[in-house]
Image: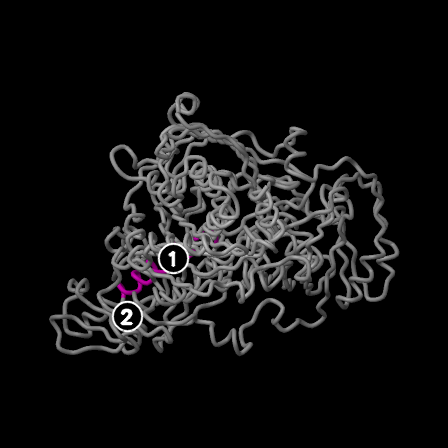
Amino acid sequence: MAPQTASPLTDAEASNPPSRERASAGAIHESAYRHVTGEARYVDDLPLPAGCLFGWVVTSPHPHARVTGIDTSRAKAAPGVRAVLTAADIPGHNDVGAIIPDEPLFAEGEVHTVGQAVAFVVADTATQARKAAALVEVGYEPLPALLTIDAGIAAGAFLSEPHTIQRGEPKRAIAEAPVQLAGEVRTGAQEHFYLETQASLVVPEEGGTLRIACSTQHPSEVQAKVAEVLGKPRSTVVVEVPRMGGGFGGKESQAAPYACMAALAALSTGRPVKVWLNRDQDMTQTGRRHPFFSRFEAGFSKDGQLLGLEVDMFADGGWANDLSRSVLDRGLFHLDNAYFLPHVRCTGRVVKTNLPSNTAFRGFGGPQGIFVIEEILNRAAAQLGLDPVEIRRRNFYGGEGRDTTHYGQKIQNDRLPDVMALLESRVDLAARQADIAAFNAQSGRVKRGGGLMPVKFGISFTASHLNQAGALVQIYADGSVQLNHGGTEMGQGLHSKMLWVAATELGIPVDRIRAMTTATDKVPNTSATAASSGADLNGMAVRAACVTLRERLAEVACRALGLDPSEAAGVGFEEGEVFHPKAQERLTFEALVAKAYMQQVSLSATGYYRTPDIAYDPKLGRGTPFHYFAYGVAWVELEVNGLTGEHRLLRVDIAHDVGESLADRIDIGQIEGAFLQGWGWLTCEEILHHPTDGRLLTHSAGTYKIPAYGDAPLHFEVSLLRGAPQPGTIHGSKAVGEPPFMFGIGAVTALHQAIAAFGPPGREVRLSMPATAESVLRAVVLQQV
């Protein structure tokens, strides 16, 4: 019999599925019909267990204050209330910090932001819990608060030490450069605005164990934090994720606190407990994309070559670390984007402010870092009188000695020339620019602009230990299959891709396989579904499990076909049949499985994968933090109304490298959605806090504007690079979740061109982010002064 674990996969084996048409060709999302019919179940859709209670979080109204006392007596006496919990009721550790233990579940001694949890009220109904929460009396002594990143920097309040990456002699290169410029770059926060807010349902089971249904991207972290807070082994906690109504990073680390509160309440009352935040609570209590502030000095040649660059980058971490250090690191890694930086020093620090602790968001710091270099190139093009498209071309990676990043990773399989060629086969950039110039020459009130946005984005968790995944595949005696893997489904189509991987490897129709709810008792010690690595990691683990099963079944097939088991390597699995070139007869997959069962062959297998060769030394600023790079390029065209500052997208053309796509339709949908989300971050989505008391002013759909259907460009075309499988990845595919988010930055380049057309040539455009109508109008007025 074949060994119980799959043989090690070579790059060629992993990149090339069995020789048949890919199972995913033309397929749709596995839950598409369930979504539109309402059959799809989320945490709030699960039937309530008997005796279920409801929780409500009591939060701080101050950005910074000393807690002088907590009186829960009135709340406990309120109708329907079963428990009011504070830090004093925690049997284990009062901490839910994702990496660094600096984030108490319930405040002790001080509160550090508006919305920080102080207590948790549990009652028979959500309404009773909400009313009782207002009766919890907390004494506060207000303390000075830092409410902006500038205030944090000025106060020397930091959550991290400096992290520096340097190559060459940037100071000398800048000083000797014929053209020098300096300035500041800012990007703002962004609300995740997932459709489903944070939700957890905890059911106590026998022996003090707990089963938790949670809307989280990281079930193993929720399991770990619940166990730590309760002082229990992780094995006593099972976390399940039915599916999420969106995540975008906001449920990577910040789902854990609410699961912990509900678990503590379930342990205290012995009854099931559910917590589900409304939109105002979710926006007020949870963190967002990190605002970044950077200062730079740059030196250019007269023809636009970047000669030297120094950048000091600051990320607003909020009041606790969460994932901020890693977010900042990725910002530093992506400062180069698609451009070679010959002499560079970039240094980053996380700033502490009295705002909610900011967290992961699609791109994870990469967009903020890439925006810096794109803005520098926009300003350099204006100062040098160069075409913004051409200055980008002149600084691309490629050529002698121009193939290594500033952190020392050699670039292999550079696909930027390929995606540029693909874009230019669809879009005549020179003609488009000529049309824009002609339109602007005859139009006074409305001006147009175009922007080229290339992307090189690193794929992997930069913390090397997170690059691992597991799977469990089980074949039943009737030939049907259950698929378990460690990734979570949040609408991005991960389950669909994993089904197609399994179907391809086993040679059976997708409809014979059932994707199971992600659960920590099926696949333990998972990494978060994040960093665009969900399909990469879990796909390889699923494949490994299927290879093990295929090897076992192949020996059974040989015996059934009258061949020696040593011929097992020649057995093929295709379209529900099993065959061998030396045998005339074919078996159905179901018949083969039935024979395997009768011969007492195991039909269950685990699979495991870890990404090879990921290492980075932050002290040296050198290493290989990424398994590979994803590439793409976009042309963004828009027009600006000079009287109102409003703008609208006219056309967006994207060429993107997804390797050998696992699912074309899903990948294209991800690219389209990522572009609009990136555009929204930089244009219409504005987070505002009260300048003195720190209250969130944009706390609902009525005060915070996300992109709508009508904001999509009139012409929107996405082309995938064909015939470019990526070595060493699952079936040659590439990650697609985060890289296309960066395409939205192209809208800012286009806005620069359109706004510049309102004034005399050569004048710098002063456009602040986000580029709301008010911001654009101010820039237009300044251009005309």
Amino acid type shown at disc 1: Ile
Query: Label 2 crowding class (10 Å Cα cut-off): few <14, some 14-19, many 20+?
Result: many
Q: Nearer the viewer, residue 682 or 213?
A: 682
Compared across the picture, whether 474 is left or right of 425 comes to right
Q: Which residues are magenta?
A: 530-552
Q: Looking at the image, which residue is at 39% across and 25% down?
A: 178
Above or below 681: residue 241: below
| Residue 278 x %, y % | 69, 62
Compared across the picture, whether 474 is left or right of 641 comes to left
Is 572 magenta? The answer is no
Q: Which residue is mark 1?
A: 654
Q: Nearer the viewer, residue 178 or 307?
A: 178
Is 537 magenta? The answer is yes
Q: Which residue is mark 2?
A: 507
Above or below 325: residue 502: below
Q: Earlier in the sequence, mark 2 or mark 1?
A: 2
Furthest residue in direction front, as rendered: 442
